[in-house]
Amino acid sequence: MKRLAVMLALLGAAIPAGGGAQDMAGQLNDYPTAARADYVFGCMAVNGQGRDVLEKCACSIDVIASIIPYEDYVEAETVLSMRQVGGERMSIFRTAAMANEMVAELRRAQAEAEILCF
């Protein structure tokens, strides 16, 4: 969240810092069920509605979750969403090296998931 907070601070926004200790199970499975379900829902909308696609999409988010922490996933997804918004103030999400790095990390995880699951 720190990298995203820095970028939003540059826009004049403030993000409350969250955190806290997690138990070991939480660290190994830090993606909330709703986030996993949302990913699978979107994946199936793109790839089809069959049981085989459900399993591939579930595999895909599991692989992504094993590669990048949930916090980094949220940051990268936020950058991708902000890139869809027009305007000069949002250009930082399209041009900043930090934003590009976040998205590249997510893209690498997605590529690995596609290789392993599809």
Image (cartoon, rainbow, N blue to C red):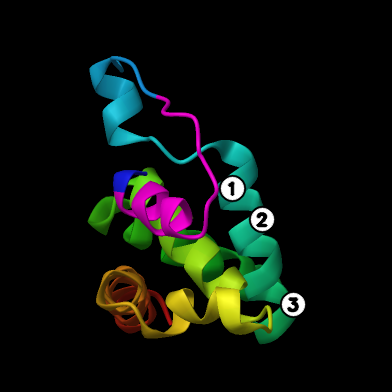
Q: Which of 10 and 2 is in front in this view?
A: 10
In-image side of 111 versus 49 (left or right): left
Mark 1 lies on a secondary structure that is helix
Please state the horizontal and vertical placement of residue 112, each as a whole percent of the image: 28, 77
Badge 1 crowding class, 10 Å Cα cut-off, few under 14, some 14 to 19, many 20 or more, is few
Magenta includes 15?
yes
Based on the displayed image, in which of its 4 quarters is residue 85 positioned? bottom right
Residue that label 1 marks: 35
Residue that label 2 marks: 38
Q: Which of 97 and 29 is in front in this view?
A: 97
Q: Tell me the quadrant of the picture where the C terminus can be found.
A: bottom left
Is the C-beta separation of discs 1 and 2 under 8 Å?
A: yes
Please state the horizontal and vertical placement of residue 17, each as a whole percent of the image: 41, 28
Q: Distance between the residues labelled 1 and 2?
A: 5 Å
Mark 2 lies on a secondary structure that is helix
Q: Which region shows up in magenta?
A: 3-18
Q: Nearer the viewer, residue 14 or 114?
A: 14
Q: Which residue is drawn at 62% across and 62% down?
A: 40
Q: Tell me the quadrant of the picture where the N terminus can be found.
A: top left
Mark 3 lies on a secondary structure that is helix
Q: Which residue is drawn at 44% across and 50% down?
A: 9
Residue that label 3 marks: 45
Q: Distance between the residues labelled 2 and 3?
A: 11 Å
Magenta includes 111?
no
